[in-house]
Image (cartoon, helix red, strand yellow):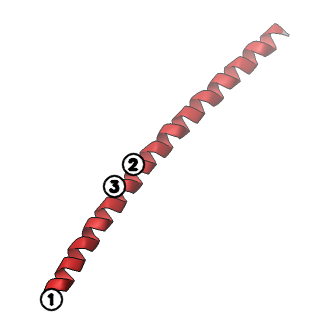
Amino acid sequence: MECRIDTEKAETEVQLLLKEDEIRVKEESIHFYQDEKKMLKEKLKNLNEKEQDFH
């Protein structure tokens, strides 16, 4: 019985580590897209300013 508990505990710890890694990867992806969004907003702002200069 104790061996089964140890095995289940080890499997659960591995699952936890995998989930933590998955979360970290997704957070990195979110930061990448947030940075990309910020750059696109800045580009749009600059284009709007240039457009205003022509009018």
Q: Which residue position is annotated with label 1?
A: 2
x, y percentage for residue 5? 20, 84
User: Would residue 45 appear left or right of 18 to someone viewing this image?
Assistant: right
Q: Nearer the viewer, mark 3 or mark 1?
A: 1
Residue that sits furthest to the bottom in the current view: 1
Is 48 rendered above or below residue 8? above
Q: Which residue position is annotated with label 3?
A: 21
| Disc 3 to disc 1, C-alpha distance | 29 Å
Query: Quarter-wise, where is residue 8 in the image?
Result: bottom left
Residue type highlighted by circle 1:
Glu
User: Would residue 34 appear left or right of 47 to someone viewing this image?
Assistant: left
Q: Which residue position is annotated with label 2?
A: 25
Q: Circle 3 — which element?
A: helix
Circle 1 Cα neighbour tier, 10 Å, few/some/many (<14 / 14–19 / ≥20): few
Is 15 rendered above or below residue 52? below
Quarter that holds the N terminus: bottom left
Q: Are marks 3 and 1 in contact (CB under 8 Å)?
A: no
- Residue at image point 44% right, 50% down: 26
Q: Circle 1 — which element?
A: helix
User: Would residue 43 appear left or right of 26 to someone viewing this image?
Assistant: right
Residue type highlighted by circle 2:
Val
- Residue at image point 85% right, 10% down: 55
